[in-house]
Structure formats: C-alpha cells, structure tokens
Image (tube, grey):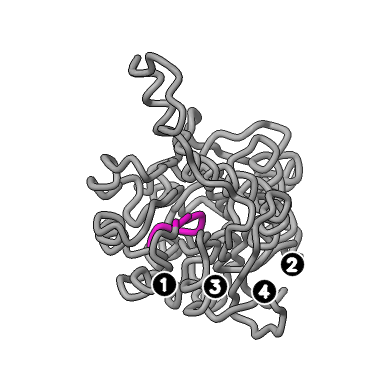
Amino acid sequence: MGLPLVLSTNLVPEDVIKPVQGLANVLQGPGGGLTMPRAEVLELAPQLSAIVNQGELLIDDELLDAGPGIRVIANVAAGYNNMDPDHLSERGVWGCNTPDAFYESTADFTLAMILAALRMLALGDRYVRAGQWKRFEPGVWDGLLLRDRVLGIVGYGRTGVAVAERARAFGMRILYTRRSVCNDAESRSLEDLLGEADIVSLHTPLTGETQHLLNAERLRSMKRGAWLINMARGPVVDEGALVQALQSGHLAGAALDVFEREPLVHPALLSMDNVVLAPHVGGGTQEARYLSRRQSFENVAQVLRGERPITPINEVPLS
C-alpha cells in the first residue's frame, strides 16, 4: 500500500510541505492565485486522506461521502465557516484552522482601511491618475484626524485586540464588544457600542448568530456620520441595508474587505466615493500566508501520525 494522498487545493512552496514528507504524497492544485474547482476535488476525493484548503471549499456530505478516507481538512485561514465542527466530529473527521497566522496582518490592514476611508486616499489616487489634479487645492481633500475618535471593535479576539493596540498609537479611544461578559471600562453591549462609536470595525467569525449581525435596524442605530469597516466576513453585514444607510447619509462612509456574495459586489457600492473596497486581502502578507500554509501541513502531519492536530476546531476520538 502506498502513502496517503494529501490534496492542496492550490500550488504552494515546496518547503511548506515538509511536515508531511515521508508521511504522504501531495497533489497540488493550480498556481497564480487560483484554487482547484470543486468538481475536480470531488473527482479526486475517493483517493484522499487529507485536504489542505486554500479558499472557500464547502466541506459537506457530498464531499465527505465521495471521500470516505478523508481524515482531516486543514483550512489555510483563521475562519472555518465552510465547515461545521459538530458535523465533522460526527463523521470522524478533524477540521483545523490557523488562528495565529493572520491576525497581525489583518490588524495592520484594518488601520490602513480606516486611514484610506477617513483621508480619502483611494479617491485621491483615482483623481491623480485620471489627470484631474492641476494645482494645489487646500481644504478640498481635508479628511478627519484619528486622535480622540471612538473606535468600536465588534469581536475582541486576537485580531480585535491587535487592532486596539495599533489604534491607541493614533490616539483613538477604544470600545469593544465580545460574547463573554466583561467589566472592563472599555467593554460595551453591541447596542451601546454602535451608538457611541465614530468608527465601527467588525472582526467576528461568521456563524448563525453573526449572519447579518449588522442589519438595517442596527445600521440605523449607529451614530449619525459614523464609518463602518468590515474585516470579518461579508454576510456579517446586510449589504443592501448598508447601501441604504450610505445613500441616506446616515453613515459617512465605509471600508470593506469582504462582501456578502463574493466576488460579487453590490453595484451601488462601486460608484460611491465614500466607500473603499478591497478584494478580501486583509490578512494577506507573505509572512502570514507562509505561516498559515506551514501550520496547515503540520496539522495534517499530526493526524496522519494518529495524533491530535495542533489547532483543531473540533474533537475526534483518537484510535
């Protein structure tokens, strides 16, 4: 019998595969930022013992039925809304993520998005590139100072804490909300935070509870003239309701790295000068991507040895 087969849904550097050398053979998907289509994964599934998943491959009964030998799914990401931990446990399959890999990169990018929105950086860039800048225009491009602005962080895990550390360096005041009760002076209920914050930054995972966490009602409860930053997952915000809040002038603007129906973006957002858009790249630094890929293969190696993975999202009895 040959070695187990591990599928990486995209092409990765050879050195990140080292943890499974001698334990498995590795089949890789395409390069150039592409991932293997689901149909191809399903065709290969009967041969697989593990999948290292870079992307949003849905791990459902169809896939697990097609691949009865699959023992572990390793997401090259902190999020895992593409798979259900309880369902994986019922199927005897480990699910893994990489919670430590991306939070600092995402925190850096969050501050970049705040600055880009409040200082009209993307709009100014388009203005210069279009050849419209003819002279110094004092006052026309004046944005907002971050000092003393209230930043409301929704989701105060690793990323939220890292965002707060960076924002304090700009002199911002921090409020946050999270699931666990806290008596900290900066802690607020979601409703209170939305009413007090000048800028609301989202850093929650996507779950049944956080789907449309910011719906039309909650967007209306935000402070008039506030800004929304979404660095979580697109469906955490009702995108249609956000468009209405922006069009009405209730919100001053937004900066979005994620979208409700990626890669589709609500058409109205594309024409709004007070909205900064990015293609889901908040955690994407070279260092973070390398670490996440390496940790994913380390998780797979642990399972192939019959051991518990390093960063599981569920539990499976060890044989």
Which residue in the structure is indicated by mark 1? 213
Task: Name the residue rendered at 29%, 57% in the picture.
Answer: 249
Q: CA distance from mark 1 to mark 2?
A: 34 Å
- Tell which tag, 3 or 2, sits nearer the viewer: 3
Image position of 23 (left or right of 134): right
Which residue in the structure is indicated by mark 4? 186
* Residue type of the residue flagged with mark 1: Leu
- Rate crowding at label 4 as few (under 14), some (14 to 19) or many (20 or more) other CA atoms within 10 Å: few
Whether residue 219 is situated above or below residue 188 in the rendered picture: above
Q: Secondary structure at mark 3?
A: helix
Give percent across and percent down for residue 135.
41, 15
The one nearer the camera, 14 or 128, is: 128
Q: CA distance from mark 3 to mark 2?
A: 15 Å
Marks 3 and 2 in Cβ contact (< 8 Å): no
Task: Name the residue rendered at 65%, 62% in the picture.
Answer: 173
Q: CA distance from mark 3 to mark 4?
A: 32 Å
Q: CA distance from mark 1 to mark 4?
A: 21 Å
- Rate crowding at label 2 as few (under 14), some (14 to 19) or many (20 or more) other CA atoms within 10 Å: some
* Residue type of the residue flagged with mark 4: Glu
Whether residue 78 is situated above or below residue 137 in the rendered picture: below
- Tell which tag, 4 or 2, sits nearer the viewer: 4
108 is within the stretch colored magenta: no
Give percent across and percent down for residue 204.
53, 66
Ranked by sequence position, the earlier of labels 4 and 2 is 4
- Rate crowding at label 1 as few (under 14), some (14 to 19) or many (20 or more) other CA atoms within 10 Å: many
Ranked by sequence position, the earlier of labels 3 and 4 is 3
The one nearer the camera, 305 or 225, is: 225
Which numbered marker is on residue 85? Answer: 3
